[in-house]
Image (tube, helix red, strand yellow):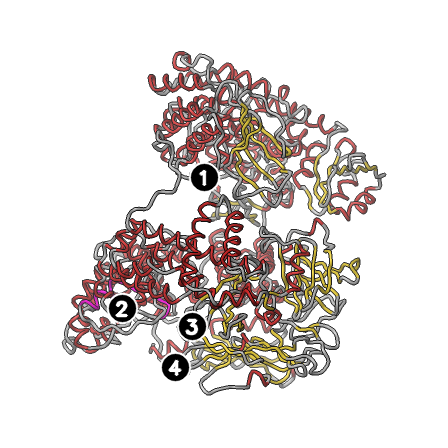
Amino acid sequence: MSEQNLTLLEAGAVLPAGSPVAKDDTVDALTSRTYRHPVLGERAVVRLVPATIGAAEDLSMEFLGFDKPAPVNEVGLVRQQALGFPAWALVHDPANGHHALALVKEIERLARQAKSRIGPAKDGFNALGERLARAVPHFLPTYYEEAGRAFLAADSTTYAATMFGKARDAERAYALHIDEERQHAVFLEFALAGALTAKALSQHARELSARCTPADAYERFLRLCVERTLGGLPPYAQMHTDLRRLAKAAKLDQGEADRQVLDQLLSAPSLSRAPEGFWAAYAGPLSELAAADPTLRGRLLGMFPQHVADEVWLDVLEQAGATAALTDPQGTVPFAAESPDGPAGWLGRFDVHRQRRGRRDSRSVKLLALLERMSGRLKADGLPVVLCRRHSGVDLDLLDACLALGVPVADPDDSARYQVSRWLSDEREGRRDLVAVAGDGRFLGALADNLEQHLRPNYRETAGDPERVRAVTAVPGLRTAAHTLLDLIAADTARHGLPALARHLDRLALLGCPDGVAVNPEAAERVLGHDVAAMLGRSLRTGLLDELGWPALEEAVARLGVTAADNEDTIGIVNQYPYLVLRRGDMVLVVGEHGVELEHMLRIPADQRHYLWRLVLRYVDKQLLVCWDVGRERAGYWSGAPDDVFTVPDNAFDMSDAMSLPLPGGGRTLGGRPLHVGDRSERHTGRVLTDGASYWVIRHNGDKLVCQEFDPATGERGRASLPAFLEDGAVDGESLVLHLSRLAPRDPVAAGQASPLLGWRVRRRADGSLVGQSTDGTTYALPAGAGIRGDLSGAVRLPGSDAVCGVFATRDWRRSSMTLADAEGWLLGEYTVPQGPSAYARGTRLVPGAAYWHLLRPRDEAGSAALRAVTDEWCAAMLREAVAAIAAADDAAATQEALVALVAQHLPEVTDPSLRAGVAGLVERAAVHVTRLTELRDRCEGKAVETAPKPAAEWTGGVQDHLLSAALSGLIRYCYSRNDSAVRLFAATGAAFTAEQAPTGQLYLDADDDWFDALGILPAAMYRAASPVTSPEHRAALVELLTVVARSGLLTPGSRLREVELKADQPVDEDGLPGTVLTFGARRLLVLSADADDREVKGLEYAADGVFGALPGYAITRERTLDTGGATPDRITEFTRLLAEHGPIAWQHERVAGLSDTAGISLAEATMVLAGLPQQAWHKAESEWVRELLGVDAAAAGAAASRMRSGSVTATARLLALLLPADLAALWRSGPAAAEFAAAWTERHGVRRPVRDDLIVAIDKADVDGSMNASELIHGIANPDTCRWLRGSVDGIDDDDVFVALAKCLPWLVYHLPADDPIRAALPRAVELAQARLADPAMSLPAGYVTERKIDALLAATGTTRVDGADGSISAGAVLLPPDTGWRVVHVRPALLTGVDDPVLHVLRARLDSHQDGVDAALHALLGGQLARLVGYPVPAGIDGFAQDPTRSVPDLVARVAQERGLPADAAALYLQLLALPDPTDRNTALWTGWKPARLKAARAALAATDLVVEAKRPRAGRSLFLPGGWLALKAPHLPLERWKLPLLIGGENGVSGLAIVLPVAPAPQLFALAWDRITAGDGPRFDELVTERRR
């Protein structure tokens, strides 16, 4: 068919009848069908229906009472639709068609639900599908397809794909007939909708090959792939593999088949998204086609496949001959073969493509080689190549090559990123010298900026890395960029003020080494020789913020007791213009122009103070609103009624600090409805402006700011306009910066115009400069390019000066700050808002926002006048004295005191203490810069002195943490790895504890504190080091650990160590305290961490005499003594000598059985113990040599390792240490001290008979061990009379876990144990002991949880008397609530129940918020006698194998079945297994019967030939024969099974019980009889009768 017709059909068009169509196209005739109904009389219903589904439509209308259609006319052509649901059912199964129609309403309801609640809709479709599977499984494919369409309509391709997969699963599971044409249409429909996975397509290819002839399979699959790709989807990754496999099976010529595929696909736009494998697979055929087709070569130049490596695509273009159009002179190749936008456009597009694919960090040698060949054509064309785009990375090699070859390159965008770090890290060949880039002024500045970013890998980096600098200067182009960077730094240093000097010195420090400054020594000298005294002089003459103060604010700060230690976590400030609300701790002050307006103490409950950073404070009509976070909601009160605490949604009040204003009539407005006293929510719209008469709000309208009038009484907004102040002075070419504007009376609540207006407006001029003006006419202009961060928020004149300074505000997620600058952009100070004190405002504790600066008043006018007169020479002399004073001071307080004294001495005119402190702070900053410049010069000249503390001379580095952690795995807790920090920690700690004098200052503690646990497991580490399965590198790590600890002094005989957690009496310094050693008499304490908020300290204490005591100044909240297990320096030295002399101990397998028998552990567990409990990935290949040496398989080793390391790592290490004999040499002579280990183990667990490992593994795999360890569980069941937890509670195992595990495992053992297994005899005794425990009145088990407010109703429902215990517990009959608060755990006392039907159990199930289903099911199994009956079933005597083999356990029944059903004996036996057993997989059947594959195959064939079973493929079934009827697809680890078997299972109708097990109600012999009794009673396997609503 024509391409136009194809496009129209895909868009849903109806083509005229008779339009040309190709034979293969899935098109259908559109028919008009006229229906009549007796009720409608002469009126008719006409429906347009595709012919394929016409019959189904006729049946649907007949169901509604319409006659057969007449006439039926063909009116056009449409895309073919597959028969869906219920149409397919109506056509192919008319007898059940009414059921299909009856389900339509439910399907439509679920389809609507899928658009809003997709999860419940999916559950609904699945539940309906299960109903259909039980009765009419042949409906399932079309039903699930219809469900998939519902999810497609809800835009959920994932769920649609799931439903499509279920449709195909149903075809396989029930061996349904497949209509190939219908299925093709469905596959195409879902593929084009994006709901068909590559896995499903590959599976479809395999199934086609299985059910069709090879030729048909290939043609059908090729047709699907082509239509899918032409429909807009790219080829999937394995498409070529699937097609070639089918073509090979069809014996087609592979080359011709590939060319046929390409010929049909190359016109598809989606091919650009084809995976790399597609192009690599078809590169050869593609080149053959392209060689003969210029248009194809041109198309290839117009596309860049998204998922193909650059090198691969360039190879494809080369092989296809397409690159000739890029390299050859214009006009020498056919016009159709040219790139659509020429070679320059192609190169730019390819560069964009590489960026989008993240290939900027991959140097492309092939691209550079191609560029060299393209250069002649590019220069001849003269069109610039665009390589530096907006916000995009730049391929430096490509750019440099273009410039070096003379290729025209477009001017760069200012935001282009020159990623120097990526370029340097790319080690691939082809790196260029970047000389051409650095030689072009258009790129040099940006290259220098990006070079600076490379030299500073993170924002904290202030010291350059000489190696990094050398790597940069070794590249000629980057060396030029470094020269430019130094010029920029020198220029910025001269242009900016004192506050910026530190940043510029940090920038210079990035190149601060001889190699760095050598690239531009003149510029470096301009920075290093900078006159700091002149900078200080200019700053003092211009002015300091400390010359101004707000007396009322300073009074409030004093009343709050604000100190220098306070920060944003302890101080809160909220703008409530014209007031400021301050909070420190629980005290809140409202500050007005002339003083404190209100004082309030917060009344927030102690348990609701977790999120005080989200506290909302509002000041309205002399009352304070306090509103705090209580989780998902907020609580609050008004200060006038503090006891009236209300709860509101979290969004009731806004967290922003927007400009709000009080209203003359009362209330406060944020641009919406005003907030009044008593209100419980506010309406925030934006910043509010007012001229005293009218009100405006500045708010966002989309992405644009607008200023609108609004009614402050209602919040109703009006027209957009501006206050007169903002409109005045407007000049053409200047734009108003609206978000920086503010306007309000000095006193907004004053009547009329009694209060003067205070406002600020900012306009941006055409040249980029800013000009701001206040209502009093004060004007400040900021030149373009001044480089000051922040918004121009105000202007101020400092005392004694006519100059106007600009105020700039910056706010980001880390902090808010303000900057003061003079008219030239020279910085005078930077201040943190509102906290401080800043180094440039040392005398001002809290700096208010710019909206409050009109309240600042001169502090000391005489002092300000003196500052205006200082000279540079005076500053130089002052700095010399200041540098000396700082060097002589002991700490920051002494430094500040000395500098204030200097200021008082040299500037006696400055008398105000705050101003004096401010001048001292500025002098201190300048002096610090002088010192920094001196140090930086030394460093640049190669004379820098190393200031970091040097390690001890004998230390040469140690074992890496990650190796040591791996060597100690399972013996200590996980520790962070930081080089060799662990052994350094032990060495440094030992030296600090044992030195004659305790060290002063801080030790460098970079190690994880948990490494100290290693001191308590040294004997276990010694044994593991001697193990033959410990790797050499791990052995070396353990030996080094032992050696370092032995030499450290930490094991000095008579000494002891303990870890302590302390509560300090006084505040602690969480930065300065960790790493210090505190002395308490002869004892020393190494502080490991400190928490200033809670005054908590964690440390390690050393007592040389082994005697611990109290720690004055601290309360001990927790302590743990580190028991070294008898490890002494001499014993460790002796061990390491023996290990070096003899090597690891020899492995002797005969010791395993002895330890297994004496300790009562399995063979694999004994193996793990003797091997040192090695930590291996037992299922992986790298552990194979260990398994071979030990003689253990992977599954048993994994289970054994899990058992032996269960519990705490400390307990594991202590057990392992028992294997180390007292005489260390005996370890090599006679082996480990197995007797000591066995004695300790039996003391802990009792005397036991070992259980075989394969049974432990099987229990673990079946997941019937509950929360217990599989080995511990089965060992206890097999040895009930010595099992501790069968007789009472034990540490480490919860009682409820015991009963749940028994209820799960005992039925499993009854079913799976061979008939002659001795463990069977122990099962009744285990049940008896468990029942005896339940009969103990003191026994209680957790039944679930309930909230505290529901306890009374719960207890009342039990009908028993409530008893409150002295310890806070509550009991009522069989119900017990242990002491607790909040969400209470509810226990049940089984001994007080009347049985499994006790009403208490029903009450608990109905009323608990969370119910323990496992405990409930276990109680039913034990109290109801189900377990006792199950383990008490007699096993027929003489069975020498598995009872699941009916020829052994019920031979008479096998003979009867064979006779009655006319089956061979083997087929009859197999039939009984299918009827009765939940897991008759082919593997299990072979295991139980012992039959050879041929015999089993014959039995299956004989049974499959009857109608007793169906043959199909079902996921995870493990067999091919099934009983007729419904199918229950249980999830792993359970096997799916037929629904007919449910009455034979413990879980009954649900299949899986509350214990999460799928096991039969009786042993296999009785189970066979029960199943056959159902057959003889007429209750055989069958499909259910589908019940739906009948048509009325």
Residue nearest the observer in this picture, 49 or 525: 525
Residue 1207, given in percent of the width and then of the height, sits at 56, 30
First in residue order: circle 3 vs circle 1:
3
Label 2 neighbourhood size at 10 Å, few (<14), some (14-19), many (20+)? few
**Dot 4: element:** loop
Rendered residue at 79%/63% (across/down):
640
Residue type for callout 1: Asp
Question: Of label 2 and label 4, which has the lower sequence position?
Answer: 4
Residue closest to the eye, 1510 or 1456:
1510
Judged from the image, the secondary structure of the residue bearing numbered disc 3 is loop
Q: Seen in the image, is 68 located left or right of residue 359?
A: right
Q: Which residue is mark 2?
A: 263
Q: What residue appears at the point 26 percent right and 71 percent down from the top-left corner?
A: 346
Residue located 52% across and 31% down the image = 1445
Disc 1 or 2, which lies upstream in sequence?
2
Mark 4 or mark 1: which is in front? Answer: 1
Q: Is residue 254 visible?
A: yes
Q: Please tell me the numbered disc located at residue 824.
A: 3
Q: CA distance from mark 4 to mark 3?
A: 82 Å
* Image quadrant in which you'd find residue 183: bottom left
The mark total stands at 4
Residue 1250 visible in this rendered orientation of the protein = no
Q: Over which residues does the magenta segment extend?
A: 390-404
**In the rendered structure, which amino acid carries the disc numbered 3?**
Glu
Asked whether, in this view, residue 42 is left or right of residue 1077, the answer is right
- What is the x, y in percent for residue 448? 31, 63
Closest to the camera, between mark 2 and mark 3, is 3
Mark 2 to mark 4 CA distance (whole Å): 27 Å
Q: What residue is disc 4 on? A: 18
